[in-house]
Amino acid sequence: MDKRLLIVFPHPDDETYGCGGTIPKEVAEGTAVTLLTLTRGEASSQGPKLGLTRAQMGEKRAAEMAALRDHFGLSELILLDFPDGRLAELDPRLLEHAVHAAIEKVRPQVIVSYPAHGISGFIDHLVAHAVVKRCFVEARERPGGPRRFAMQTVDRENAERAARVLRFDSDDDIDCAVDVREFLDTKRVALDLQDSIREVIASDNIRGVLMRPIEHYVFWGESFSPPLGGLFESLPD
């Protein structure tokens, strides 16, 4: 099967935090991976500390994402410019149109985004989940549409180790546990490439939380126990 994966997150860094081991693993297995980022992350708290305007911070983070594209070996990076931190203020149809356009272009079998709780609870994460889920359920009804919506999550153990409060999914609800041990060095470099938020990453990675050897996913409308080992295993018809 010609595997195609579309990853949709609201901000630069979301993909590395949650899927930074899964992405290079999929690329190594021959999967065409496209990353769609809805904003440029210009509202980061690090901007003022670096003496950058919001526009300058957005440009810096966009350059970091271009480097990340090459590092991961992505088939494509789609970096949009919706307002960081204000996705809930937009007409959701604007976001849906952008996601549908990517689905039509990529024709992925699997789409990855946030779960309903957004892990951190940040409003942009919640909006991204709702938009991507709606697009998925519409697109899967079309010929050649996506077959699976995989929601990147964390388990209880890693949530409790984190430096801030995180939402998590129970072991019973996790449908996929991807072993990424061989790709942790690739993830480490990906985190280093995002120099503009180095301070945030260092804070969040206390006790190695971001370098966990297993990355977890919940599948919308599916249930697997024990969890599958890969995003493309046992795809529904």
Image (spheres, grey):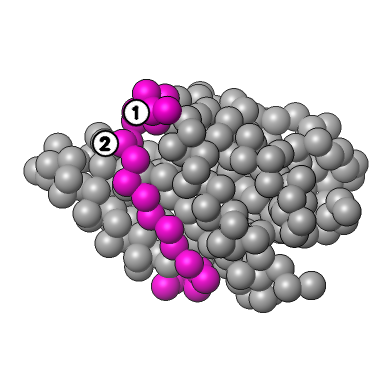
Which residue is label 1 attached to? 86
Question: Residue visible at 48% across and 53% down?
Answer: 36
Left or right, residue 60 beside residue 139: left
Which residue is label 2 attached to? 43
Percent x, y of residue 180: 65, 60
Quarter of the image with the N terminus is bottom right
Percent x, y of residue 145: 72, 54
Left or right, residue 72 beside residue 44: right
The residue sitting at the front extreme is 142
**Span shown in magenta:** 70-91
Which quarter of the picture shows residue 174?
A: top right
For discs 1 and 2, the disc positioned in front in the rendered view: 1
Say above or below: 32 vs 223.
below
Which quarter of the picture shows residue 2?
A: bottom right
Residue kind at label 1, given as amino acid type: Arg
Say above or below: 157 vs 34.
above
